[in-house]
Amino acid sequence: MNKIKAGIIGASGYAGAELLRLLLAHEDVEVVAISSQSYLGQFIYELYPSFYGICDMTFVADQDVLEKSDIVFASLPHGLSEKYAKYCDENNKKFIDLGADFRLDNEKDYQDWYRLNYSEKGLHLKQVYGLSEVNRKQIKNATLIGNPGCYPTSIMLGLYPLLKEQMNASYDIIIDSKSGTTGAGKSLTEDTHFPKCNESFHPYKIGCHRHTPEIEQELSKMADQKVCVTFTPHLLPINRGIVSTIYVPLKDNIKIEDVYQIYHQYYDSEYFVRVLPEGKVADLKFVKYSNFCDISLHYEPRYHQLIIVSTIDNMVKGAAGQAIQNMNIMFGLEESKGLKMVPPSF
Amino acid sequence: MNKIKAGIIGASGYAGAELLRLLLAHEDVEVVAISSQSYLGQFIYELYPSFYGICDMTFVADQDVLEKSDIVFASLPHGLSEKYAKYCDENNKKFIDLGADFRLDNEKDYQDWYRLNYSEKGLHLKQVYGLSEVNRKQIKNATLIGNPGCYPTSIMLGLYPLLKEQMNASYDIIIDSKSGTTGAGKSLTEDTHFPKCNESFHPYKIGCHRHTPEIEQELSKMADQKVCVTFTPHLLPINRGIVSTIYVPLKDNIKIEDVYQIYHQYYDSEYFVRVLPEGKVADLKFVKYSNFCDISLHYEPRYHQLIIVSTIDNMVKGAAGQAIQNMNIMFGLEESKGLKMVPPSF
Amino acid sequence: MNKIKAGIIGASGYAGAELLRLLLAHEDVEVVAISSQSYLGQFIYELYPSFYGICDMTFVADQDVLEKSDIVFASLPHGLSEKYAKYCDENNKKFIDLGADFRLDNEKDYQDWYRLNYSEKGLHLKQVYGLSEVNRKQIKNATLIGNPGCYPTSIMLGLYPLLKEQMNASYDIIIDSKSGTTGAGKSLTEDTHFPKCNESFHPYKIGCHRHTPEIEQELSKMADQKVCVTFTPHLLPINRGIVSTIYVPLKDNIKIEDVYQIYHQYYDSEYFVRVLPEGKVADLKFVKYSNFCDISLHYEPRYHQLIIVSTIDNMVKGAAGQAIQNMNIMFGLEESKGLKMVPPSF
Amino acid sequence: MNKIKAGIIGASGYAGAELLRLLLAHEDVEVVAISSQSYLGQFIYELYPSFYGICDMTFVADQDVLEKSDIVFASLPHGLSEKYAKYCDENNKKFIDLGADFRLDNEKDYQDWYRLNYSEKGLHLKQVYGLSEVNRKQIKNATLIGNPGCYPTSIMLGLYPLLKEQMNASYDIIIDSKSGTTGAGKSLTEDTHFPKCNESFHPYKIGCHRHTPEIEQELSKMADQKVCVTFTPHLLPINRGIVSTIYVPLKDNIKIEDVYQIYHQYYDSEYFVRVLPEGKVADLKFVKYSNFCDISLHYEPRYHQLIIVSTIDNMVKGAAGQAIQNMNIMFGLEESKGLKMVPPSF
């Protein structure tokens, strides 16, 4: 088989660079071009010395990426992806957007949370939300994917079987999430200045993080009912990984054993979702640098409350890895291709 | 005035060593003796080289500490403090227990959670729960203090005005807490082995942490009603500090402005509790190495939910610092004496 | 081609676990058995949850590993490898020792530094020092490899071209090395207790680290002259990676340009050694989780002094990765097989 | 006694903020004003929330600081301090410069390394190099202090007795230093962006760090002979602290016992310099947040080489603390006043 020609628009950011790193190890893919407007003409290894001697690509113009690729990945600030998606749509190329522009079904949500309109409204009718395990069938036939956000991925996989089977007693769900600093990206900020960030911990954007509408949209689909979340992200002084601790009261007639059974039923055949044995606790340590989502289930008997701990690597399952997983699905490849490395333990 | 003669039983552990460090800077206190059964006869600086050249005390026998001191601090594993408290009680010395033996009013709770009985039942009638800001009056006249746990301190100060004024719509409260590793103490464990702990994050003892009965006991007193908590502690890969993120639905008629007003009313005269201005978020960074508790209040209007973020240094306000604050109260000293250092910002 | 049957003795330690992780991704290898005396019968994922759902091997007895394998890797405390090596020698199996037992040519050195004798003296005549880039020819035909230590690997690759071409003005070389904590292994120690290790930095075993004789032995071979080193290792509060900063005065007639030329001549064809462009500085960040050794060269013109900065991942090029590289050489495979992953940049 | 009126110019930077933190705890000092051009009019706690509720000073204009203060501390980028020093000189106020403008005796060095001239040449004749332990007598009578750099302080205190007593066999000294990130200051940089800096380690400015001429100037005075240093700073992924590992061959007739004896002779009466007992190793952990300099001495008998490990907190003894120590000397106060806190062990 010919290799898939893949290109990356916005490859100078963290998600783009991680995508490049993973695609270079994917034996069915050839990365044909990478672009960056800020670093046009520079070698990738000037920005990321880890590529030195392995990849001598330079950042080219966006148009070069579009023309050379069978599939285009875009990793851009919100509001910039539509024109690339349109080009791909018109030229019969596949497009996976790692940003937020093709995640929200309802333009109103996009306007409310991102303060922008959809320019190409028709295009958004074609978008498929790329949560691989849940939307596999639609992804298979899609040409335009809105790749899920990092926090939402950890949360949705954690809640999917529960909501789908309607085992929860409430649709107001409290989600306390914690993310490593790569989630904040490559741009320098006060919060990610080492002397400030190191030995620090705090929540941020409480009640107003832009992942909220995406989470509620998808959870509501799963539950077939309006789901509301209180979502509080925190910044962890580590590089990678998200832990979401999710609190949901169970229906009276549901036992913790039932919950385990359903989770195993949904996920035992999923390569990338690991439901941990009873008594074990999910730790982002053990999914780092991998595409796994580890889920542990805990029960507070005094209040018949379920506590779900769901953890991913925000740069892999939460961004670049899931994008590749979606590409694999779209091209009919083995879904785990290029993503099977055992996560390092230390 | 003569200096207070203070002694520390169990000074080789983290809380004991922190207490020694702080007491050495307290101008009204003379530390007369420190004990450790494991390190008897050794210099404190052999264990903690930071003391080298400043303090040349050696660990002596417990009895020496008891005899020489006006006030005895004990920092021991649970189940070991009663006999020291009894001696102090009989010999007219004050006693502050930094462990768990004098925190629970109800022996049944102690039996359930610690699997031990109270041997000296009479003694427990005299114990005062040493949450300084809340129980100041009783502490003033107490001779036997159960110094609060670290998690409970952050949680109770965060909830006190709300519960006391009954502004909450529910008495089932979700508390997601995160603590630095010093909370786990000096003993070597797998979880605190650097290559494991570093770049790791996970909850632990979900639904079964021993601070739970203490939290519920004191919150129930504040609320004058049975309060139940879902309490999930997490281990942060940093040295010091606790952040508790607390979720409470507000009563319909309560506005966030009302909440702010009450918190300011309760805490503006408290030196060690800082209610942050609206829009600011509490960060353990800014209370580290200090006795402060920073509280920030956040509102999720869509569900009329209050999110309280409360942060302390687990070794200071969560242990040694609050013990000294209690000593200051008991001896009629300025409450902040020896505890006024500005926390370092970096 | 049939897959190589590989086994690991001592797979519960860090080097063994890393070896397993890497071998599982090596398409020409089948890991047939892993052993551990302490964890006999347990699943690998009980110790290292990152393996959960990917590898369900259990630790078996050493003899099982020996019998099933074409090549045996041993990762054991010193003094324990000889008997396994002997079995392999007698049974026509290849053996790579990741410990210290087959690194020193001179039994006297082993006695002096490790306080043990060689039991199987004949075996040691067959041992080949597995510094892949330097001893490739001997490794190709070897059946018994002493895999280099982590510090020595970073140091020897940093100095090899210089010494081989005798560009140095002195044979007393000062080496200031810094290593992450995984180098200290899985055993709990005071120095790697998180609250102690975090935000700490210090040298250790100054002038008496056991890697010293190994370093001097191999550098002396390169220089064809007795080389003496002042070697000071330091413990870095990070997980992985070594930086060695090496100080060598240059011969009067040698210019820094000459040094660059020679390094490029030696290393440009080496996949795993990257001589950085002038002006760049080697950083362990960019070799982590990879088999690369990055070298940067710096010149202090006032004293005609060369400063070499050499960095590796101590667990990969400094242990498991180089062992696999040696295996590839021994079996006639592409040398970089299974080791080509781009190191992550963050 | 009236309190000393102290002011800080450039209080928004790290050294200025640390100075403020320490001065607030100094009972003989009143901080009368702090300035910042960038943050004029803002509260100190807006920048550094640790000050919230403790200090409600705002940044005022530089001139206000100058007029109100008996002693002015300046913490500014190089090239900006002369005019403030001049004002103080003309108005009979004391001036301590924490920057580099009054450290170099020779204008040529300043021109070579900082690319600037001295505007007020006469002023520089009055400058005293504020290495407290070494220049105490001159500091006592000085009105204008050039406060030493952080690296130089660790290095000079480490070498002072050795050079003064001429026990060294060479005047070419190799110094391998490592510093925490606060040394790089408050400004955002790529190197201190958390995802880059964390789990990273590398040298920088090899052979060209601006502390070099200052180090050589002062060491040469101590040795009464030209001393040359090969100085390699490294960036540690921690907040605070410097470790300098210094390599010096000893004269043939000097024994390690002699070295110990001399170091104790020089430093046993110094409160802030701790010569550690034989067998102990200096660790920045144990001087953090303190004004101590810990020194350990190590001997490599095979080459008769001395290895000195010297460690300080770069923000305290390396900046703000030593400035206060100098102020104490200038005002005839107990030298350790306000600086006696025991460093925390964890």
Image (cartoon, coloured by chain):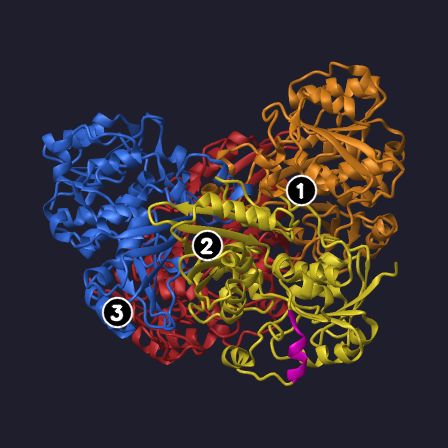
Chain colours: A red, B orange, C blue, D yellow
The answer to whether residue D174 is above or below residue B25 is below
The answer to whether tags 1 and 2 share a subunit is no
- Say few, some or many: other residues with alpha carbon within 10 Å of mark 1 (under 14 / 14 to 19 / 20 or more): some
The reply to whether the C-beta atoms of the residues labelled 3 and 2 are less than 8 Å apart is: no
Question: Does the image show residue B224?
Answer: yes
B302 to the left or right of A13:
right
Q: What residue is at 61 percent from the left and 26 percent from the top?
A: B41
Residue D68 figure quarter:
bottom right
Which residue has dot 3 on it? C259
Span of residues in magenta: D120-128
**Image quadrant where residue C143 sits:** top left
Residue at mark 2: chain: D
Q: Which secondary structure is most common in the magenta stretch?
A: helix
Nearer to me, D63 or B326: D63
The residue at the point 12 percent across, 38 percent down is C125
Q: Which of marks 1 and 3 is in front?
A: 1
Residue B272: image location, x then y, percent: 79, 48
Q: Give the residue type that dot 1 points to.
A: Ile
Q: Which of C79 and D40 is in front in this view?
A: C79
The residue mark sitting in front, 3 or 2, is 2
Task: Residue D189: give x, y in percent of width and height.
Answer: 53, 69
How far apart are labels 1 and 3 at the CA level? 51 Å
Which SS class for mark 2?
loop
